[in-house]
């Protein structure tokens, strides 16, 4: 901007951009705090244990360790449910706890196939309600922040299926 002579425009844009960034951060912080609190309430009320039982057939196929480790099953269930709700930030602590439990079973510092599947599932995550994206869209003035639902459902389902398929294929190729 100095070369093109737009220095004053840049100087005016910096505070506006900073203010917009702070407003967005504060609006997201409120949404994240709300959903993290709801997650804790769900855990205390036993809803996470219920979800763990509900997801057991799915989890036991993808993560066989959950059959012997109920804490791991609970962490994975909470992580998956938070990701279903589009709450990646709220899902992160449960995902880290599940990854630590899976990593403790790894030998020689090499990630197990289950740990790789967790990373894929957590990164791609199927989202039924993209709450964080909707909060960003609403804070930016979108009149219908959830009108993206069909696109989110299709793309997130495709990304999870493709990611888990790739993880399965790679586990078969690079067996020890």
Image (spheres, rainbow, N blue to C red):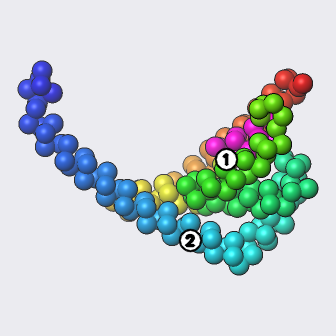
In the rendered image, the vertical position of residue 175 relative to residue 36, given as above or below: above
Q: Quadrant of the N terminus?
A: top left
Residue 145, percent from left and from top: 45, 60
> What is the distance, in whole Å, between disc 1 and disc 2 at their CAs?
20 Å
Q: Earlier along the polypeptide chain: callout 1 or callout 2?
A: 2
Crowdedness of circle 2 by 10 Å Cα count: few (<14), some, many (20+)?
few
CB under 8 Å between discs 1 and 2: no
Q: Which numbered marker is on residue 122?
A: 1
- Image quadrant assignment for residue 176: top right
Closer to the observer: label 1 or label 2?
2
Is residue 111 visible in this depiction of the protein?
yes
Residue 159, percent from left and from top: 67, 40
Residue at position x 62%, y 55% in the image: 93
Is residue 168 visible in this depiction of the protein?
no
Let me know if residue 78 is in the magenta part: no
Q: Name the outermost residue toward the top.
A: 3
| Residue topped by disc 2 | 37
- Image quadrant assignment for residue 44: bottom right
Let me know if residue 118 is in the magenta part: yes
Q: Name the outermost residue toward the bottom.
A: 45
Residue at position x 42%, y 56% in the image: 136
Report the magenta residues as a range: 112-124
Q: Which numbered marker is on residue 107?
A: none
Along the line of sight, the residue nearer the viewer: 2 or 43:
43
Prevailing secondary structure of the magenta residues? helix
In the rendered image, the vertical position of residue 119 relative to residue 172, given as above or below: below
Residue 89 is left or right of residue 116, and the answer is left
In the rendered image, the vertical position of residue 54 relative to residue 99, given as above or below: below
Callout 2: helix, strand or loop?
A: helix
Residue at position x 50%, y 57% in the image: 132
């Amino acid at each position: 901007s100095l070369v093109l002579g737009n220095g004053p425009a840049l100087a005016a844009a910096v505070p506006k951009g900073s203010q917009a960034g702070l407003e967005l951060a504060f609006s997201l912080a409120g949404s994240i705090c709300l959903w993290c609190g709801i997650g804790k309430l769900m855990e205390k009320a036993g809803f996470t244990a219920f979800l763990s039982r509900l997801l057991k057939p799915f989890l036991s196929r993808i993560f066989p360790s959950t059959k012997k480790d109920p804490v791991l099953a609970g962490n994975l269930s909470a992580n998956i449910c938070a990701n279903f709700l589009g709450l990646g930030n709220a899902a992160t602590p449960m995902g880290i706890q599940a990854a630590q439990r899976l990593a403790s079973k790894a030998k020689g510092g090499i990630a197990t196939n289950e740990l790789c599947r967790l990373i894929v599932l957590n990164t791609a995550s199927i989202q039924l309600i993209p709450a964080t994206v909707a909060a960003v869209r609403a804070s930016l003035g979108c009149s219908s922040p959830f009108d993206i639902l069909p696109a989110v459902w299709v793309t997130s389902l495709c990304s999870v299926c493709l990611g888990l398929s790739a993880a399965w294929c790679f586990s078969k190729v690079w067996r020890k």
